[in-house]
Amino acid sequence: MEKRRTVLLVGGGSGGHIYPNIAVAERLYGLDTDLAVHFVVSDRPLDNTIMSQDSLEHTATMARPFSARPVCWADFVCGYYRACAQVSALIERTSATAMIATGGFVSAPAVAAAVKKDLPVALVNLDSLPGKANRLVARKVQAVFSVYLTSVLPGAQQIGLPLRLAALATEPASVSRRHFGLEPQAQTLLVFAGSQAARSINQVMMQFCAHASLAGWQVLHIAGEQDRQAVSNAYSQAGVQATVLPYCHQMGLAWSAATVAICRAGAGSVAEAWANRVPAVFMPYPHHRDHHQAQNVRPLVDCGGAVLLTDLVDPNANAQRLRSVLPPLLGDSRQQQQMRGCLEQNQFADGAHILAKWAVSH
C-alpha cells in the first residue's frame, strides 16, 4: 500500500513555536485531505501537554537549547546529534515530502537532517529580530517566510503569523464570558501571562488590584499553575470579580471575552491580540539580550493599537507604572474603540494558509 504524503511540522520548547504549526496543520487538512502531518517538538512537559490535548501525532526530540555555560555544552551537542538521528529516521519512516520549521533549538537539528535527505524545507521566522538558529538555518532551506520584515533574512516573504482557529474569536463576548463564569455584559480585562506563565505579570496584577480600583471591570487571568491560587486570593481580597485559570486551551473564547488585555509580547500573543482586535498593554519579557519582544509589538504601537510598558521586574515598580497607564485606558471607551479600529486597518494575510499551500506544492 502506498504511504500517505507527510508534512513534518517542526518547532517546540514553547507554545509560541508549536501553535503556528498547529495552525498550518488545520489549513493543510482543508487543502488536501490526503496529506498527513507529524509534529516534531522537544521533550519538555509543555510540549507533551499541547500535543496530548488534541492527540496530535508527534516525535519528542532530545534537542537542547544552546547555553554559554560550558557545563551545558555536552548536553547541547549530544542532544543535537541525537535529534538529527531521530528526525532522519522519522523522514524515512513517514516518507515525508516537506518540512516547515518555526525556528528555535528544535528546528536546527531537524533542518540539518532534512537537508541531508534533500527534503524541501521552509523556515518561518516568528520574531522581529531573528535569532542565531534562524539566521543559520535560513542559509540552508528552500523558502523563508517571516512575520516581520527584516534585512537579516534577505528574500524572506512576509506573512501574517500563523494562528490556529482556536485562537480566533468567533463567539459573541457575552457567550464567551459566560463560558468562563463571568458576567456576560461586564467589561472584561484579560490578563494573559503566556504558555509558560510570566510571574512578573502575575505579581504586578496582585500589587495593582491591592492599591488601585478596577471598579466596573471583571478579570479573566491565565496565570499558570504555580501562581493560580495566590492570584485568585489577591482578586478576592480586592473585591474584584475574577476567573483565574492555570492554562487556557480555547484562547479564541478568551480574546472574545476581552475588552482590554495585558500580556507578554511574544510573537503569538501579539498576533492574537492583533487578529482579534483587542487593545492591549504589552509587557515584553525583560531578560532577552536583544529585547526582541519589544520589537514584536512595535507595529501595533506605531499604528495606535497597543501600549508598550517596560517590565521592570520589581512588582512595586511595575505596579506604579501600570497605575499610570491602565486606569485611563479602562476608563476611556472612545480610546478603546480607536485602538480597535487601528488594529482592524492593519491586518495581514493568513500566514497559515500561505504555508499550507507551500507544503502542498512539494
Image (tube, rainbow, N blue to C red):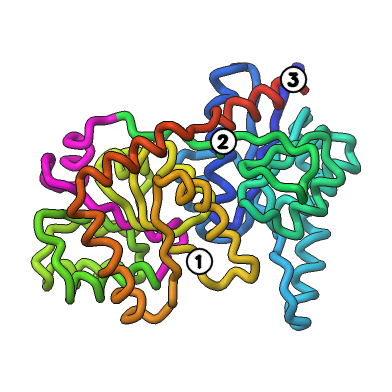
Residue at label 3? Answer: 361
Asked which quadrant contains residue 114, the reply is top right
Instruction: From the image, tell me which residue sits under label 2.
Output: 160
**Rendered residue at 48%/34% (across/down):** 346
Are the residues tagged 3 and 1 within 8 Å (C-beta)? no
Is 240 placed left or right of 72 in the picture? left
Residue at the disc numbered 1: 285
Q: Nearer the viewer, mark 3 or mark 1?
A: 1
Q: Residue 186, position in %: x, y?
A: 12, 46
Q: Is residue 99 visible?
A: yes
From the top left corner, tell me how far across and down residue 184 is, in percent: 13, 40
Residue 146 location, quadrant: top right
Q: Residue at position x 34%, y 43% from top?
A: 339
Cβ–Cβ under 8 Å for marks 2 and 1:
no
Residue at 19%, 42% (x, y): give it: 177
User: What's drawn in magenta, residue-wise?
Assistant: 171-199
Q: Give how far apart the Cα atoms at labels 2 and 3 are.
A: 20 Å
Q: Residue at x 31, y 68 (%)?
A: 322
Could you say where residue 132 lies in the image, as x and y percent from the top left? 76, 60
